[in-house]
Image (cartoon, coloured by chain):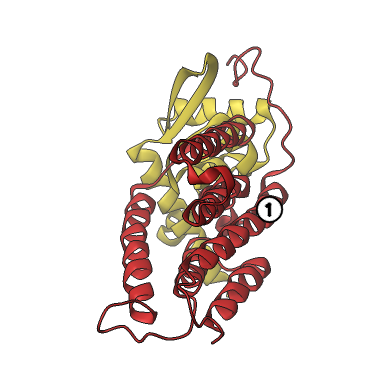
Chain colours: A red, B yellow
């Protein structure tokens, strides 16, 4: 009996539903393109419409996971940990990015990409704590960390390129996470609901 | 039966692999539905259903039947007694493992 595998099923379910990361990555890319006012994205309503379409895609993907792989409510401990993690994430993104490069007087003002560095560190920590780092996590987020830390980000504010890189990394990581998810929980065959999900007993 | 042997007796209801898997998965969540339990334990629908019935009869799990998006959905959670018994069972197994070393 693989006790550890059974106990981590819930964590794997929460973390590795990788297709959900595709709309998240798309939102990052949309934010970067919106900031640059690329094409029709210079109009606020186009940006909002695109964001809504991405939201609808996320809901559809969530429904796919719920119907093919089931639903669960995490334990109170996991929910508290997620809440603390979120506070830590916001603090790291705001504080870390400002420390590395900003107009603040206490900023180190390094020629790096603070968004890419902080987000990569955040994701590495999140996966390490949540489900343990897999090879693709180390490669993708380690790669983003190195790219952000290279001292080549002189000149204009690199935040938008950072957002674009983060968005691409989130999408690629999501595809690999989903692959791992299917390996753990099986292929997405439909469950027969005709007579209910539990035979009469 | 000596006191030591009595202390090491395993809970037969829980020790069956299918039921042990169900209770172990449920011990790490607040609640989960039937489909998730199917996926996480690898049991068949019929097996999972009969194991859940036995666990419900023993008061170790609480089963709630509901509709989600007009489809029947069965939600399962450990009772306080179930949570206590599965924790005690794993502790017992660990003790046996340590004794075997």
What residue lies at 68% left-to-right and 41% top-to-bottom?
B42
**Within 10 angstroms of label 1, few (less than 14), some, or many (20 or more) residues?**
some
Left or right, residue A57 beside residue B45:
left
Q: Position of residue A30 (x, y in %)?
A: 54, 50
What residue lies at 47% left-to-right and 19% top-to-bottom?
B65
What residue lies at 26% left-to-right and 84% top-to-bottom?
A106
Q: Nearer the viewer, residue A168 or A122?
A: A168
Please indicate, yes or no, whether residue A3 appears anywhere in the rendered image: yes
Q: Position of residue A118 (x, y in %)?
A: 44, 72
Image quarter hosting the C terminus of chain B: bottom right
Left or right, residue B94 beside residue B44:
left
Q: Chain of mark 1?
A: A
Left or right, residue A91 beside residue A142:
left
Q: Position of residue A194 (x, y in %)?
A: 66, 13
What residue lies at 61% left-to-right and 36% top-to-bottom?
A69
Residue ranking furthest to the left: A105
Q: Which residue is mark 1?
A: A175
Q: Position of residue A147 (x, y in %)?
A: 59, 78
Residue A28 vertical position relative to residue A19 in the rendered view, above or below: below
């Amino acid at each position: 009996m693989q006790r550890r595998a059974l106990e981590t099923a819930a964590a794997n379910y929460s973390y590795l539903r990788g297709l959900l990361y595709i709309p998240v990555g798309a939102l990052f890319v949309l934010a970067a393109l919106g900031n640059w006012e690329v094409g029709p994205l210079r109009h606020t309503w186009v940006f909002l419409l695109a964001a809504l379409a991405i939201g609808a895609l996320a809901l559809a993907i969530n429904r796919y996971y719920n119907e093919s792989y089931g639903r669960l409510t995490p334990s109170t401990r996991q929910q508290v940990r997620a809440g603390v993690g979120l506070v830590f994430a916001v603090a790291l993104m705001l504080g870390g990015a400002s420390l590395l490069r900003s107009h603040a007087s206490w900023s180190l003002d390094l020629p790096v990409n603070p968004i890419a560095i902080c987000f990569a560190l955040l994701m590495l920590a999140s996966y390490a704590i949540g489900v343990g780092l897999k090879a693709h996590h180390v490669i993708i987020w380690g790669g983003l960390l190195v790219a952000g830390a290279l001292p080549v980000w002189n000149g204009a504010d690199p935040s938008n390129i950072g957002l674009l890189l983060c968005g691409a990394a989130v999408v690629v990581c999501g595809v690999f996470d989903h692959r791992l998810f299917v390996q753990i929980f099986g292929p997405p065959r439909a469950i027969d609901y005709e007579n209910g999900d539990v035979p009469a007993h | 039966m000596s006191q030591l042997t009595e202390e090491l007796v395993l809970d037969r209801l829980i020790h069956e692999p299918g039921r042990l898997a169900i209770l172990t998965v449920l011990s790490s969540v607040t609640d989960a539905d039937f489909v998730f339990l199917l996926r996480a334990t690898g049991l068949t629908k019929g097996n999972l259903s009969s194991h859940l019935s036995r666990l419900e009869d023993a008061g170790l799990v609480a089963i709630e039947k509901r509709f989600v998006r007009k489809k029947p959905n069965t939600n399962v959670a450990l009772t306080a007694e179930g949570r206590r018994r599965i924790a005690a069972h794993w502790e017992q197994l660990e003790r046996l493992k340590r004794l075997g070393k």
